[in-house]
Every structure is written in structure tokens, then in C-alpha cells.
Amino acid sequence: MRIKRSMARRAVAALGVLALAGSLAACGDSGDDSASGAKPDKLTGVGPITLATGKDTTGTLNEILADWNKAHPDQKVTLTELPEDADQQRQQMVQNAQTKSDAYTILNLDVVWTSEFAANGWVEQLPEKQFDMSKYLPPVIKTAQYFDKLYAAPYASDGALLYYRTDLLKKAGVDKAPTTWDEMTADCQKVLKLPAGKGMSCYGGQLDKYEGLTVNFSEAVNSAGGEVVGANGKPNVNTPAAKKGLDFLVDGVKNKTIPKDALTWKEEESRRGFESGKVVFLRNWPYCYALMANKKDAGNKVAGKYGVAPIPGLDGPGKSTLGGHNLAISKFAKNKKTALDFIKWFTSEKNERTWLTKNSQAPVYGSLYDDPALQKQFPYLSTLKQSIEKAEPRPAIVNYGDATAAIEEQAYAAISGSKSSAQALKDLQDNLTKITSKDK
């Protein structure tokens, strides 16, 4: 699991910064921060709680929860596992909120969902003074805020990384990772000429029709100098630069640089594709590092044979989408004081270190990226920190579900060949204009 994210969850669509209108503020910021009128520093209720999160594929989560339960026998936390797919996770959380159910106490939100849940009044405002914000990486703080108020605690960050086969590149005479798409394609062609490269494709990502496609599409657009939504909050995706980004994916599938299987890949499918030797290069999140390094079975052909670099772009290093997860307290839950205490404990620097060392999950504390011992164990930490600090955020948009669905629909149509990239971007521009106009 990537306790999602996203995986990915996961997570994962750099649309730019979307300005929300005052009518949205009225929807989510009344100054009365719970259904009972409690202020954020007056959350009440002590007792059992639940943690709703994506499927745990790591095996680590229950170990950490057991530590809490042992120390808090009267305030035990029960794990509620949602589907691995990020879209399905969000759907179940939204349904739970719309019915005002108390089934979920703590929600593990993809960073892009925080504003949506805050604006709709589905999560509690948190007491910011009880979290040491100075220790967090600056980009992750904004993902947990809505109108400058804290509605979730940063739990995991994420930046995209390029995994590459060091053994095959070395055999092909390539001594460093590519920084541009053209370099990556050229390096791959050298590998494919080798006996060891027979049957392989060049590059894989997450191109199934789900949130991961929004992320991959947006990274491609931003890495080509384009944008999906501009700084003024208006869609700006029907541009030559955006077309260059989308065409990187479209042409890749068309000329088989990207395997057609990638159209069915989410995070885990793509990781397994790289592990099994289907692709030379893989765009994925840092959680893959530990899984591929530690997994000992016949299907893992890459252990000890891969490196990590920034994702490439059109003319130089690309721009990652800012991923990660935040923990929020459901507005409709019981035992909110216990929930707050648990979140502070669960997101402690000690537990962040555990997640990093066991599962290579990207921490939210800057100090962990600079720790010499951790850098020795995870040589990519400096690269990951840079990826996160330069990543493009997804928009703080209440109708984000509609926006990401529109992106997925049009991007998939172009990549799968059922629509030209030019038409897909024109249609996406029209769709996003209608969706964002609802927020005014």
C-alpha cells in the first residue's frame, strides 16, 4: 500500500493554482468548526476511532497501529481499508460524508481532496498551534490548508521519480540517466538493440483512466512548458505547449515506445511491469524503491539493477505533480479528541522515519531528507526533495472530482487513439471552463 495514495496513492494532476471565489469560502469557512460548534482547539470525545485509508499493501500499517492500541487500550484505532484505486477511495469517503455517517473517524485524504472536503464542511478545522509547521517541507503545508486554515495534518508527501535499469544502460554504453524525452528515447533504443533488451519497451507510467492519468498527463503538459489551469484560475490547456506534452504520451503509445499495456496500468501494475522487465524506464512514486529492492522472487528482475533520477521533460528535467496524503477528522465522527491525539502521534517524526525506512514513503519533515544515515540507505532522497520542492500543485477546487474525470476522459481518448490530441485538448478546455465556472 501507499497509505492513500495514491497509492499514488497514491497520489496523484498539476493543474496550477485555482483561485476559489468567496462563495466557496462561505461553504467551508463559517468560523464554527464542527457540527456541535466546537472550535479547533476544543475537539471533544475520547474513545475508539477508525482510520479510513487505501488498501495497505505494505504490511507496515497494522504494525504501527498496534503500537498505538497497546498504549491506548480504551482508545483503540480500527483500520478501515478502502479500495486500492484512488478514485474509488474518494467516492466512498464522499458518500460517507454526504450521509453524515460516523463510520470513518480519520480520513486519509489525497492532498488534492483536502480543500474539497473542507469547503463542503466534511472535515474539522485542526488547531494549527498543536503542529510544528516549521518542520514541514513548505509545499506540503499548503496542501493541508483551506483559506489559510489547517484542515488536515500532512502525513506523506510525494514527488515523481524516474526509475531506470542501470545494468542495461551500462551495457548499452550509457553512463547517466536522461534529462529529456529525446535522450530517454535514444538511450532506450540502444538498450533494445541488445540481446538483453529483446521484447522490452522504453517507458511506462500510469495511463489507465483514473487519477493517475490526470497526474501523468499534467506532468507531461507542465514538463513541456504548458499548463492545464493558469495562475488566474482559468483553464489554459488548449495550447501548443500543452499539445507537445500530450503528444509525448500519444506518440509514445503509437510508436510503441510506451507499451500498450500501460493504458491499463495504475501504480502497482506499472511497478510490476518494470520489475518483470517490460520497460527500461518507469515513472512512479518513491514507495516503489523499497518494494523493488527488498522483494526477493523470480518475478523481480530489477533488484540491485536500477537507479533513480528526476523525471525528464521536453528540454530538460520535467516537473512532477505534488502528491501525498493528509489526515483529517470527519465532521460527523465521534471521539474527535482521540482522533486529534492519534493524528499528532501518527504523523510524528519518529513514525515518519519508520515509514521511510520500511517502505521508502516520502516524509513531510525536511530534516529526514538531510539525514546522512538515511541518505546512505536511500541515495535518491536529495533528488526526491528537489522533486517535491519544485512540484506543481493540483488545484484547490471544490469540483475537483468533475475536473479530474474530464481530464481522464479526454487524455485517455487521445492516448488510446480514439481522438486526436488537438481535438482532445479543445474538448478538455471547454469542459474545464464549464466546471470551473461553477465555483464562481
Image: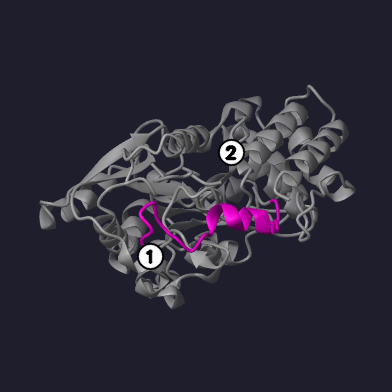
Query: What's drawn in magenta, residue-wise?
Result: 15-40
Q: Which residue is mark 1?
A: 39
- Seen at 34% across and 40% down, the residue is 56
Furthest-front residue in view?
Answer: 37
Q: Position of residue 2 (x, y in %)?
A: 41, 45
Viewer-nearest residue: 315 or 80: 80
Q: Position of residue 302 (x, y in %)?
A: 46, 42
At label 1, which amino acid type do we have?
Lys
Residue 248: quarter of image = top right
Does any portion of residue 191 appear in the rendered image? Answer: no
* Badge 1 density bin: few <14, some 14–19, many ≥20, Cα 10 Å: some
- Seen at 26% across and 59% down, the residue is 44
Q: Is residue 8 above or below residue 227?
A: above
Viewer-nearest residue: 141 or 421: 141
Q: Position of residue 204 (x, y in %)?
A: 61, 38
Q: Is residue 191 above or below residue 36?
A: above
Disc with the residue nearer the chain's start (2 vs 1): 1
The label shown at residue 211 is 2
